[in-house]
Amino acid sequence: MGKLVLYGMDPSPPVRTVLLVLNELQLPYEYKVVNLVERDNHNDEYRKLNPQGTVPTLVDDGHAITDSHAIIAYLASKYGKNDSLYPKDLVKRSIVDQRLYYDTGVIFERALRGTTKPIIFANQTVVPKSQIEIISNVYETVNGFLKDHSYVAGDHLTLADLSLIPAISSLQVYLDIDAVKYPNLLAWFKRAEKLPYYEKANGKGLKQFFDIVKSKNIKIEE
């Protein structure tokens, strides 16, 4: 096995996704902090690894892999002891992939990044009602994924869960999960919090994310 080096920062949900998978697979890794606020991601050394300047970046034995979803699929495929996290069965895998794509395009991009980026980088203090509606729709959709299953892509933990956990937990800084409206989602999240590595891989960075957002004294539009 080559040396694994993860570049990122704990408040980042995509970085926390990779941390969850690394811990689930019990893989040793070196962690190098890339401070986005200090623009570490724009220096020449980092840009050589990741021309987009995003986090996370994983280097495995000298090969750089970017985007959390690509990284976790790579890790599970290469280092998984079995295919439970990322099924080889194409029908089961298609469900996991759909959840990952939904995370990429809707949960992270539209709901989380769409709400957070103006707050962090443009000093916006009012969260538009339209963004809260997007978050609510995400909760409703994922609650539906969980209607007949304990996990978002079936009856056991997969990459889909480990990808959604950081984003869903981060969205709660803007909108709590209503136990009456979204009981399946809330039960799933409480199940996620019981993972033995949850605090190390997600909880610590989640608190930092909450602190950053709350320090902006945001208000939710009525």
Image (spheres, helix red, strand yellow):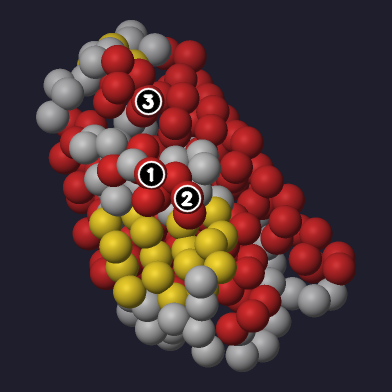
Between marks 3 and 1 in the image, the one whose residue lies nearer the viewer: 1
Q: What residue sits right under mark 1 in the picture?
A: 44
**Would you place residue 144 above or below residue 96 in this image?**
above
**Amino acid, disc 1:** Asp
In the rendered structure, which disc, 3 or 1, sits on the residue that comes first in sequence?
1
Report x, y in % for residue 43.
33, 42
Identify the element where label 2 is drawn: helix
**Would you place residue 62 above or below residue 106 in this image?**
below
Q: Is residue 43 visible?
A: yes
Estimate the spatial distance between the alpha carbons at disc 3 and disc 1, rounded to whole Å.
24 Å
Report x, y in % for residue 93.
77, 66
Estimate the spatial distance between the alpha carbons at disc 3 and disc 2, rounded to whole Å.
25 Å
Report x, y in % for residue 122.
30, 15
Farthest residue toward the top? 222
Farthest residue toward the front? 44
The residue carrying pointer 1 sits among few (fewer than 14), some (14 to 19) or many (20 or more) residues within 10 Å by Cα, namely few
Q: Can you tell which mark lies on residue 117? A: 3
Left or right of residue 77, residue 195 in this image: left
Give the quarter of the image for residue 72: bottom right
Q: Nearer the viewer, residue 175 or 207?
A: 207
Tell me which residue sits at (44%, 34%) in the image.
112
The residue carrying pointer 3 sits among few (fewer than 14), some (14 to 19) or many (20 or more) residues within 10 Å by Cα, namely few
Q: Nearer the viewer, residue 73 or 94?
A: 73
Left or right of residue 141, residue 212 in this image: left
Identify the element where label 3 is drawn: helix
**Amino acid, disc 2:** Lys
Q: What residue sits right under mark 2 in the picture?
A: 48
**Amino acid, disc 3:** Lys
Tell me which residue sits at (33%, 10%) in the image.
221
Identify the element where label 1 is drawn: helix
Is the Cβ of the residue at disc 2 closer than 8 Å to that at disc 1?
yes
